[in-house]
Image (cartoon, rainbow, N blue to C red):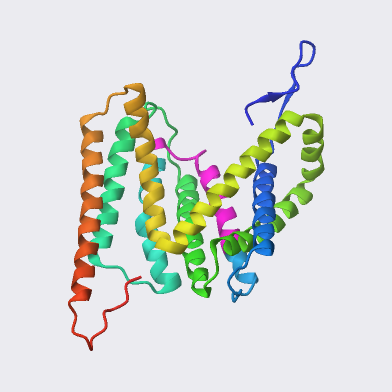
Amino acid sequence: MTRTYGATETDPGEKFKDSQFLVFMNRILAFTVAGLYCALTKQPRHGAAMYKYSFASLSNILSSWCQYEALKYISFPTQVLAKASKVIPVMMMGKLVSHKSYEYWEYLTAALISVGVSMFLLSSAPNRHVSTVTTFSGVVLLAGYIVFDSFTSNWQDALFTYKMSPVQMMFGVNVFSCLFTVGSLLEQGALLESVHFMARHSEFTAHAVLLSVCSACGQLFIFYTINQFGAAVFTIIMTLRQAFAILLSCLIYGHAVTVVGGLGVAVVFMALFLRVYARSRMKKRSKKLPPGETPVQKV
């Protein structure tokens, strides 16, 4: 959206400004790919009612809107703390949506990961001192983002109890995402204008398709992770991704890591070690149970 298309010596060109159309492109391609895959390959028997996918789709759209709008009204440290602390809200939403139970060490390690990632991101970001003031509106929008985002992954996790495949989940969610976004585009009169822009600039069309392909591939990994490991683990992975991206940048480009940042990395690795250790202890304990006693199922 920052790129100028069609620029010549006499024409300054134009920029594409409708991000909602790009979202629609992402969703329509993901819907098409998932639909073709489901039609051409054998999939598990579908047991979930179609309307249930609309909840995940709508909450995902609302979380994205709240996230982007909140950036206008909150400071950089607030952004970092909110994104790094999503694990606990996701676990709490899991108890509400799916009645999941978590061990005390899972809450402890989630909190440690949030603290460690926050320390590292706040100390390593070059523009951490240049930020807007956090307002009440920004806090409300940020809270909405966390709630809707936590609901989305947990609702998708709950839908997987119907024994569907990640591709079926991708198809169902994107059906409603396409309907919601195209309805909004038609209401605003932006759909035809965006299509005309694509017709005028073939380079933009290629870029939009490439973006949509990458988005569709990303969705497959997201749904597979939620299906195999659950919403909480998926959120931990996404939280750690932010820290590892900056850490990798520091290593590649030689940026210095502060003492606080290094301490934050140490806290994260300690939390991950504790998580692996506690889980292995639980597995060993379940194997030692008497033959007639069944272990409590861990979700």
Q: Quadrant of the C terminus?
A: bottom left
Residue at image location 43% in from the left, 36% down from the top: 133
Q: Is residue 78 above or below residue 46?
A: above
Residue at 62% across / 67% down in the picture? 42
Q: Is residue 128 above or below residue 166?
A: above
Q: Is residue 161 visible?
A: yes
Of 6 and 132, the residue lying toward us: 6
Does residue 150 appear anywhere in the picture? no
Left or right side of 295 for 35:
right
In the image, farthest residue toward the bottom: 292
Examine the structure image and report whether residue 71 is included in the region drawn in magenta.
yes
Residue 162 against residue 39 in the figure, above or below: below
Residue 10: where, in percent of width, then height? 80, 11
Q: Residue at x 20, y 55 (%)?
A: 274
Residue 289 on image: x %, y %? 19, 80
Region of the chain picked out in magenta, as a range: 56-77
List x then y, in percent, for residue 148: 50, 58
Side (left or right) of 145 relative to 94: right
